[in-house]
Image: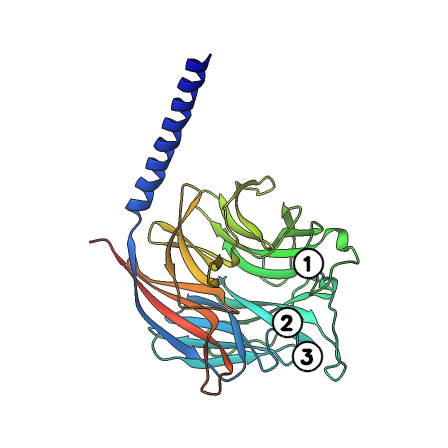
Amino acid sequence: MKNSNFKFFIIILLLILIIFKIDNSLYAKTPKVKIVSINRIFDNGAHNAFSDMCRFKGYIYLAFRSCPDGHGINPTSSIIVMRSKEGKKWETVNRFHVKYRDTRDPHFLGFKDKLFIYSGTWYYGDPDIKRNTFNINEHLGYAVWTEDGTIWHEPVMLEGTYGHYIWRAAAYQGKAYLCARRKHEFADIFSFGESRNTIMESAMLESEDGLIWKKKSLFQQKNGDETAFLFETGGTILAVARRGRDNAELCRSKSPWTEWERKDLGEYIGGPLLVKWGNRYLVGGRKKTDDGYKTALSWLIDDKLYPFVQLPSGGDNSYPGFIELSPKRALISYYSSHEKYKNDETITAIYLAELKIDEN
């Protein structure tokens, strides 16, 4: 009996060693990534956060929220939109806000020859009346868009998004899709500032014109939160879903995207990014470390994360955007509060990192 137990122990040990060797072999094959440069590209003394980037008609576009009253909900917030040819010199091409609402989390979508920017907005009301609680049931999505990058349409509310906190968008075969979290059955509990709980769910909304939305499917029944979609050839969709302060999940579904598979990614990811850089999958966002929260990037290989870069960051930070310059060079936008002015006041600014893959 003892001999049998010993053999069983040896078999388990060998299996663990084999799995460890395979995992480390994959890690060894991931490319080395060098930070070529990092620049603070926008700082106006306000709280600047929640970035996104895209390409549109020969330009790189960058959007983020700027608010003189900080991270919290405030109708003094606005969305700033900038563009650049190569990511070096930037010009502001639009700035918008929504009356009585806090605008935040801008995300781009190139769709039907237009460039859309979607913003989730909290209702605040009269700015002269101080509010301390906010209800996601009063949330409403807004959009601005352009056909040439210069002339922008004024903010328009998105039909079908009331009570939904909209986030990243993606397009596939002539239709647009939004991540939108909401309370289950719009229950009249849970407000900003309280801990998230199981009543929060995430819906996938669908639109034919980018402005009128309807529910396509429900991909998180509990702990729904910020989610990044990525459509694959053939209609399979990958998604990296934040789960509040819990571990993020990798979600996968085939068309018509009504049934979903989910895998625990083993770590918390705030403000998730999911893109392809060349033929590799890149995941980014806020990560817990021994030195606090940092903006970090990982390769996604066989449904596992392999970290490769931790960007200079700290405090209030993350929400990266991504632009591929080539299969070996890329730009990452993000915000961070790791620097201070000479008077020791914290700077919350937008940063741009240029990365290079070094496979030598």
**Label 1 CA crowd tier, 10 Å (few <14, some 14–19, many 20+):** few
In this figure, which residue is indicated by the disc labeled 1? Answer: 195
Q: Residue at x 68, y 60 (%)?
A: 164
Q: Residue at x 57, y 75 (%)?
A: 153
Identify the mark nearer the N-term, 2 or 1: 2
151 or 67, which is in the foreground? 67
Residue 162 is situated, as x and y percent measured from the top left of the image, at: 71, 62
Res. 179 image quadrant: bottom right
Q: Nearer the viewer, mark 3 or mark 2?
A: 3
Compared to residue 68, the image places residue 26 above or below, namely: above
Identify the mark nearer the N-term, 3 or 2: 3
Left or right: residue 257 versus residue 231 is: right
In this figure, which residue is indicated by the disc labeled 3? Answer: 99
Left or right: residue 18 versus residue 242 is: left
Mark 3 touching mark 2, by CB under 8 A? no
Residue 59 is situated, as x and y percent measured from the top left of the image, at: 38, 72
Left or right: residue 340 versus residue 19 is: right
**Label 2 CA crowd tier, 10 Å (few <14, some 14–19, many 20+):** some
In this figure, which residue is indicated by the disc labeled 2? Answer: 156
Q: Amino acid at mark 2?
A: Val
Residue 354 is situated, as x and y percent measured from the top left of the image, at: 33, 67
Residue 218 is situated, as x and y percent measured from the top left of the image, at: 64, 47
Q: Amino acid at mark 1?
A: Ser
Figure disc tally: 3
Q: Nearer the viewer, mark 2 or mark 1?
A: 1
